[in-house]
Image (spheres, rainbow, N blue to C red):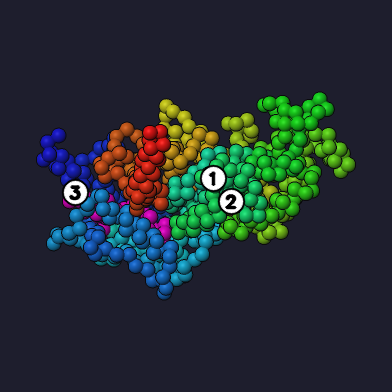
């Protein structure tokens, strides 16, 4: 297309003269004259969409690396704010993009973003009661983010960052008059990562935490141990790690875990570990085989019926010696992990091995137990009491509730079952569990490890409305704390986690943060496509959702930042990529000397 014609069309778009339906590639230049009512939030490429936005812009502001600064009203330094000011400065002014820093006579500058935080407090670790509310006012000179807490300030900073873009003069710009008022719809917005089936390296986990914060997720549910591996470093029972790990490189040391927890804190994210039992314990049983149920066939122990049960599997609840060990394991979790909650799993408890064991049958008969649900309930009650004694609140998979256990009302029940996999509708479980006064985390519709092809898969995740078939009253509705996207790792490791997770988790982020009436996928796909491009610009190699392109910073291009140190942690240091020159030289000299000695010996 002729350059002059292209320029004319762009000007006409800005003036509102031309109106047409665009086949979207990238939101690079937001329209200047958008109307100011809430439904026009779609005019700005924000993800997740805020609760209220008023855009009365008439022009643009320019941000220069030479003059733009971020300030807070906190009376003393706060590492959370300092770290995020550093992170977002890198996001705004990444060297590879070579932005024009000159403020010309015709430019209107934005020189400062000021954080006004009401509680003037630098918090410790985020918890269930964090306040993420914020207000953002973009205007010439000094723009302002008002928040009740640091956590709200972080969410406001992310929104502010999404309003910036590079203008035709290669300058970082933002529209000049925007007001946003925002808060999350649900307080719990989580992602489950399974690092037991495949180990995910620490630097890769840190990058996922960054990406979570870019989407306003606030809980990392860490499924750290399972049948396949026990990758958590235990000091109390070192053999759990030694016998349960894949290898020395596949262990999360307690130092690693603390690093991840501290990194999550800086992003406003809680870390909730899971210790799953009485099933999913094969790696645990390598150290404690005496507590694993022996399976019987034809009057003989240690007999497998494959596809039904193995030779031995699942904890044996009748063995009282298991409970002191479990208390020690959970007490070590408490020492290392900072969150008030621990996830105790207790899903997929299959009874066939229990049923085959004559010792269990005898034990049950002595206690007038006639159903194996009762045995599971016995185990669940015991381990829940251990957690209570340790002053830990608990999340469990819904199997515990389904099998008749009624724990403390602070216990969160996580729903994973659905008619799609042979159970009842997840909405029926939601109605039932909340009617009995239990808080709920919803995961059933958001298992993103399932991959389909042939349509825009994210639509089905986006169109989920958690309250669509809810039959309870307003008080009962409050018991739905939020939801969680689950990425189980049967086919995921550090090589493909980012492409599998992003932007497929983004629709769930918006469903959990934004008002329920922001729900049109045809509108959302344009903003989601921009969010995917934004993740690329922040070093996350997210997968595409539409045909088209993002820009000259895509993966493999010269301006790609996927491997830039600003967005990576440790593993890309030069010493990890290039052998030590001195050591290599010593090795060559020693090898040469060895060959000379052999030559002298023979001749």
307 versus 176 height, above or below:
above
Q: Point out the image quarter for the C terminus.
A: top left
How many neighbours does mark 2 have within 10 angstroms: few (below 14), some (14-19), or many (20 or more)?
many
Extreme residue in the front direction: 603
Where disc 1 sits, the SS reads helix
**Quarter of the rendering containing residue 414:** top right
Where disc 3 sits, the SS reads loop
- The residue where tag 1 is placed is 248
Q: Considering only order in the chain, which callout, 3 or 2, is on the residue closer to the N terminus?
A: 3
Extreme residue in the bottom direction: 75
Cα separation, mark 1 vs mark 2, equals: 11 Å
Circle number at residue 106 = none
How many neighbours does mark 1 have within 10 angstroms: few (below 14), some (14-19), or many (20 or more)?
few
Q: Point out the image quarter for the N terminus.
A: top left
Closer to the camera, 602 or 591? 602
Where disc 2 sits, the SS reads loop
Q: Is 50 left or right of 109, judged from the image as shown?
A: right
- The residue where tag 2 is placed is 233
Give residue 51's position: percent from left, percent from top: 42, 53
Closer to the camera, 386 or 441? 386
Which is closer to the viewer, label 2 or label 3? 2
- Name the residue at 43% across, 44% down: 506
Cα separation, mark 2 vs mark 3, equals: 52 Å
Q: Is 203 left or right of 368, judged from the image as shown?
A: left
Closer to the camera, 401 or 33? 401
Give residue 195's position: percent from left, percent from top: 53, 43
Give residue 168's position: percent from left, percent from top: 19, 48
Q: Considering only order in the chain, which callout, 3 or 1, is on the residue closer to the N terminus?
A: 3
Q: Considering only order in the chain, which callout, 2 or 1, is on the residue closer to the N terminus?
A: 2
- The residue where tag 3 is placed is 168
Span of residues in magenta: 153-176
């Amino acid at each position: 297309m002729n350059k002059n014609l292209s320029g004319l069309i762009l000007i006409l778009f800005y003036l509102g003269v031309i109106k047409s339906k665009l086949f979207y590639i990238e939101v690079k230049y937001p329209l200047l004259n958008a109307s100011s009512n809430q439904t026009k939030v779609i005019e700005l490429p924000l993800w997740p969409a805020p609760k209220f936005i008023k855009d009365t812009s008439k022009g643009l502001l320019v941000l220069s690396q030479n003059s733009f600064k971020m300030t807070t009203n906190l009376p003393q330094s706060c590492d959370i704010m300092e770290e995020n000011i550093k992170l977002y400065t890198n996001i705004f002014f990444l060297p590879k993009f070579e932005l024009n820093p000159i403020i010309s006579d015709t430019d209107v500058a934005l020189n400062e973003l000021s954080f006004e935080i009401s509680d003037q407090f630098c918090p410790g670790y985020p918890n269930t009661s964090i306040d993420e509310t914020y207000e953002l006012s973009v205007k010439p000179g000094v723009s302002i983010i008002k928040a009740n807490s640091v956590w709200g300030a972080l969410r406001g900073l992310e929104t502010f960052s999404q309003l910036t873009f590079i203008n035709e003069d290669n300058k970082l710009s933002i529209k000049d008059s925007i007001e946003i008022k925002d808060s999350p719809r649900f307080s719990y917005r989580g992602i489950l990562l399974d690092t037991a089936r495949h180990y995910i390296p620490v630097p890769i986990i840190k990058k996922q935490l960054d990406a979570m914060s870019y989407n306003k997720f606030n809980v990392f549910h860490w499924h750290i141990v399972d049948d396949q591996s026990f990758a958590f470093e235990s000091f109390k029972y070192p053999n759990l790690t030694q016998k349960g790990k894949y290898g020395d490189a596949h262990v999360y040391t307690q130092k690693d875990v603390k690093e991840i927890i501290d990194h999550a804190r800086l992003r406003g994210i809680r870390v909730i570990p899971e210790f799953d039992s009485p099933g999913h314990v094969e790696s645990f049983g390598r150290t404690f085989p005496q507590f694993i149920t022996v399976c019987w066939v034809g009057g003989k122990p240690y007999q497998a019926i494959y596809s039904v049960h193995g030779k031995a599997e699942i904890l044996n609840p009748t063995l009282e010696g298991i409970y002191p060990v479990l208390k020690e394991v959970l007490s070590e979790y408490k020492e290392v992990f900072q969150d008030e909650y621990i996830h105790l799993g207790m899903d997929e408890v299959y009874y066939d091995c229990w049923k085959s064991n004559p010792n269990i049958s005898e034990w049950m008969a002595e206690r007038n137990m006639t159903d194996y649900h009762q045995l599971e309930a016995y185990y669940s009650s015991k381990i829940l009491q251990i957690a209570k004694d340790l002053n830990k609140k608990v999340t469990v998979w819904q199997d515990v509730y389904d099998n008749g256990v009624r724990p403390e009302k602070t216990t969160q029940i996580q729903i994973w079952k659905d008619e799609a996999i042979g159970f009842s509708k997840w909405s029926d479980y939601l109605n039932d569990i909340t009617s009995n006064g239990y808080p709920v985390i919803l995961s059933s519709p958001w298992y993103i490890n399932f991959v389909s092809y042939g349509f825009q898969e994210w639509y089905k995740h986006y169109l989920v409305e958690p309250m669509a078939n809810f039959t309870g009253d307003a008080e009962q509705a409050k018991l739905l704390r939020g939801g969680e996207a689950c990425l189980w790792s049967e086919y995921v490791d550090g090589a493909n986690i980012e492409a599998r997770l992003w932007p497929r988790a983004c629709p769930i982020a918006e469903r959990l943060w934004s008002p329920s009436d922001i729900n049109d996928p045809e509108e959302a796909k344009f903003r989601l496509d921009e969010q995917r491009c934004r993740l690329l610009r922040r070093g996350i190699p997210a997968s595409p959702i539409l045909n088209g392109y993002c820009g000259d910073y895509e993966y493999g291009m010269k301006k790609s930042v996927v491997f830039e140190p600003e967005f990576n942690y440790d593993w890309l240091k030069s010493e990890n990529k290039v052998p030590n020159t001195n050591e290599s030289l010593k090795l060559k000299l020693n090898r040469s000397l060895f060959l000379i000695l052999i030559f002298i010996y023979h001749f």
